[in-house]
Amino acid sequence: MEMFIKQESTGTERRELPGRLAGREYPRRADMVLQCEVMFGSPSSNCDGNGICKIVARSEQPALRPVQRTRCDHARALFSAIDGGKGASLCFRREWLCSKLMKHHFRHGVLEMPEPCPIPQEIARALGLSIGELPAGLHLIEDYGTHFRINIRFNKIA
């Protein structure tokens, strides 16, 4: 999201990123969404097995460019913060997922993550996340027909 600030002296407008203006902090007005590549598997098993192994930002690839898949162990996703930065949401369009990923990770409506997945600092900072990793556990996969959403939260039982 960009904000426009009118400069009184010139009557022009300039664009600023939300969250920090003229050295002062302001609350964000809208949630930011980043396009990323999600590698499936377990971090300790060299990205083999269940879960999410790695998240990589996709900063220089146009959103409308067709996916040229060479392997079926990763997929494009939209990554955003939820719960005031205490959780994360991943959204996958159905056409971004190959049949192997659909059968292995999305078929039963639950993503099994046997171990946590680190979130790169630049992604966590850009999204305003207060967490540094996606927690291990079972995470519900919501099926909306054209896309899937996985809201990942820390569920601490006291």
Image (cartoon, helix red, strand yellow):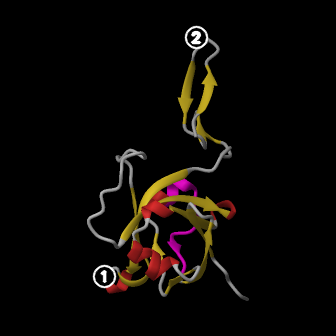
Amino acid tagged 2: Thr
* Residue farthest left in this picture: 70
Question: Which is in the foreground here, disc 2 or disc 1?
Answer: 1
Q: Which residue appears at 55% of the width and 52% of the height?
A: 33
- Badge 2 crowding class, 10 Å Cα cut-off, few under 14, some 14 to 19, many 20 or more, is few
Magenta-span inclusion, residue 127: yes
Q: Which secondary structure, mark 2?
A: loop
Q: Element under label 1?
A: loop
Residue 93, position as x, y percentages in the image: 51, 60
Residue under pointer 1? 46
Along the polypeptide, which appears first: circle 2 or circle 1? 2
Q: Disc 1 marks which amino acid?
A: Asn
- Magenta stretch containing residue 41, yes or no? no
**CA–CA distance in space, label 2 to label 1:** 56 Å
Q: Residue 39: tell me if it is visible.
A: yes
Badge 1 crowding class, 10 Å Cα cut-off, few under 14, some 14 to 19, many 20 or more, is few
Q: Is residue 54 above or below residue 14?
A: below
Q: Residue 56: which disc?
A: none
- Give left or right: position of 5 versus 68: right
Please give the name of the residue rendered at 67% of the width and 81% of the height, measured from the top-left corner: 155
Image quarter in which the N terminus is found? top right
Instruction: Write down the region rendered in magenta.
Output: 124-135
Task: Residue 100: give x, y in percent of width and height.
Answer: 39, 77
Per the image, the residue denoted by label 2 is 10
Which is more toward the observer, 150 or 72?
72
Q: Is residue 120 visible?
A: no
Snapshot quadrant of residue 41: bottom left
Residue at (45%, 80%) from the top-left corner?
A: 103
Q: Is residue 130 above or below residue 19?
A: below
- Position of the C terminus, as image quadrant, is bottom right
Q: Relative to residue 157, is residue 109 depicted above or below?
A: above
- Judging depth in this view, the residue of 112 and 70 nearest the camera is 70
